[in-house]
Image: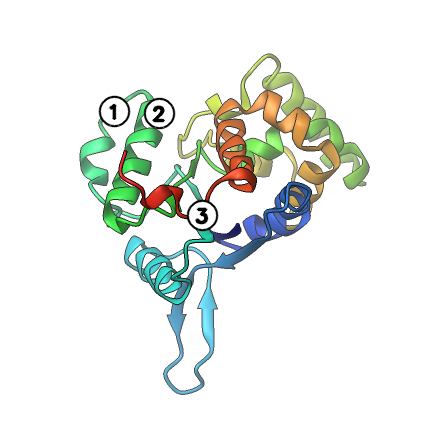
Amino acid sequence: MRLYVLVEGQTEEAFVKQVLRPHLREVDVPVTPIIVTTRRDRLTGRKHRGGGRWKQWFRDLRRLMMEQSGYGVRFTTLFDLYRLPDDFPRLEIHLSTADTLRRADDLEQEMGAALSDPRFIPYLQRHEFEALVLASLDSMDTLLDAEDDLEGLESLRESLAGSNPEDIDDGEESAPSKRLADHIPGYVKTLHGPLAVEATGLPRIRAACPRFDRWLARLETLAHENPAQCFKAP
């Protein structure tokens, strides 16, 4: 079974390449990450990738599903729940749901309904990719050199003591990415994020991030899944 992972940007792509792909390769599930295309230059044909709006995510997913039309392929996403684009399916309805666990589940169902392909496994990271980095702070020491970065790292550790990284809220000033940037001035998302997660290892990440663990467990089942199973009537 082949798996395609549509991601928002370079950080998530690096995570898939450095962490997710080697792990799933061990269970015989080859993985290909694809950064969403946000714009194409009409003159040069050059593609601009990363971020974007739902209509672009939908377009790329639909195109990929049409190109890969066989049974032996699955598709998933690694998008942030935090700051979803305002054209996301029925977003305005679900934003009023205070329980972000339920909100994430409901919005994943909206994605699935919009694509209407049984091979699709929708996933939203609660609240953003950086939750996995917050679960990896013990591995950041070796990645940072500046004294103010190391002091900020220790301050961040203390402020999050006992917290579930996936519970860190999605406020404009308190989201995981904001906390990392505020405490660690030298933090570079595309560099330090994937490296910290890779150094920490999936077992510890999964133990700290149960929703992420549930998604990964689902992807692991693809190794034993009948390719045509998702097309069979319940």
User: The disc labelled 1 sits on which kind of residue?
Assistant: Thr
Q: Nearer the viewer, residue 181 or 197?
A: 197
Is mark 1 in CB contact (under 8 Å) with mark 2? yes
Q: CA gap, disc 1 to disc 2?
A: 7 Å
Instruction: Give the quadrant of residue 140.
Output: top right
Identify which amino acid the numbered label 2 is placed on.
Thr
Residue at mark 1: 97
Viewer-closest of 80 and 117: 117
Q: Which residue is drawn at 60% across and 29% down?
A: 134
The picture quadrant where one finds residue 192 is top right
Check the image and report above or below for 147 versus 66. Answer: above
Q: Where is residue 229 in the image (x, y as percent from the top left)?
A: 39, 42
Residue located at (41% from left, 54% from top): 71
Q: What element carries label 1?
A: loop
Amino acid type, residue under disc 3 in the picture: Pro
Instruction: Give the residue at x 81% y 36%.
Output: 142
Residue ID for mark 2: 100
Say which label, 1 or 3, has the lower sequence index.
1
**Element type at marker 2?**
helix
Q: Residues within 10 Å of mark 2 (few under 14, many from 20)?
A: many
Instruction: Tell me the residue at 45%/48% (across/down).
Output: 227
Q: Could you tell which of marks 3 and 2 lies nearer the N-terminus?
A: 2
Q: Is residue 163 above or below residue 127?
A: above
Residue at mark 1 to residue at mark 3: CA–CA distance: 35 Å
